[in-house]
Image (cartoon, helix red, strand yellow):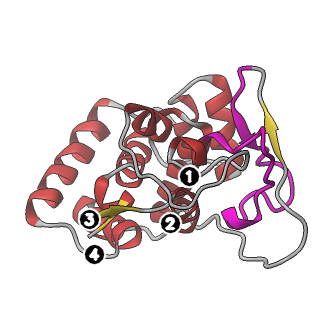
Amino acid sequence: MRRLPAEAIRDGMLVVASDLDSVSFGPYIPTKQTPVGEVIVDENVPGAFRRSVYLQQRRSQSLSLLKVFDAPALATICSSRVSSSVPLQSLALLNSDFALGRAAAFARRIDQLRPADHHELVQVAYRLALGRDPTTEESTLAVGFLADESLSSSRPASEIASPAQADAVAVAVNATTPNECLVEFCQMLLASNPFLYLE
């Protein structure tokens, strides 16, 4: 079993969310540093969702999401990549604006397919994210989660996080979003081991 490279994780999330810009060649995607030191892509600039190979590369400014998943720094020679497993990776997939935006976009993609019930929704989500049907246990747990959360929460996705994260969600979906529990379920799939690792 091996984890996907950092760039493949970012690109995979874009593909599943149906956000990937497949335009080839052309200028790089600019990155910027936030006041707290995080390096991000401004999702409002043209081409922000192109493949990671087009990201701006600067020795002093590596994209934070890629860095936490062991993308090598340009300041040193890297003959082979390490593959770590650290808490910061889970935190990035739970809290970063990029991850929240992709989860919301993924939820909207599923919602637009109009699954008949929670069982079909779970099956569609697993096929899109993991390329397979859920096991019986996975399906039971996921359907139970969606049913329980649907009863206890009907807040829109724009209310799931801080104002900055809500803005990222709004940019990603450009309009209304499915309810919070579907976004959380989609985020869980994008942060799961079957999505991040190849066997």
- Residue 182 versus residue 60 in the image, above or below: below
Q: What residue would you read off at disc 2?
A: 16
Q: Secondary structure at mark 2?
A: helix
Say whether residue 138 is left or right of residue 117: left
Say whether residue 59 is left or right of residue 68: right
Spatial distance from mark 2 to mark 1, Cα to Cα?
Answer: 8 Å
Contact check, label 2 and label 1, Cβ < 8 Å: yes
Inspect the magenta stretch and tell me whether residue 42 lies in it.
Answer: yes
Q: Secondary structure at mark 4?
A: loop
Q: What residue would you read off at disc 3?
A: 1
Q: Amino acid at mark 4?
A: Arg
Q: Amino acid at mark 1?
A: Arg
Q: What residue would you read off at disc 4?
A: 132
Say whether residue 58 is left or right of residue 111: right
Residue ranking furthest to the right: 27
User: Which part of the image, by quadrant, shows the N terminus?
Assistant: bottom left
Q: Tell me the residue at 50%/57% (across/down).
A: 81
Magenta stretch in the rendered image? 36-64
Label 3 vs 4, first from the N-terminus: 3
Label 2 vs 3, first from the N-terminus: 3
Main SS class of the magenta portion in the image: loop
Label 4 vs 1, first from the N-terminus: 1
Q: What residue would you read off at disc 1?
A: 102
Spatial distance from mark 2 to mark 4, Cα to Cα?
Answer: 13 Å
| Mark 1 crowdedness (10 Å alpha carbons): few <14, some 14-19, many ≥20 | many
Label 3 vs 1, first from the N-terminus: 3
Residue ranking furthest to the left: 137
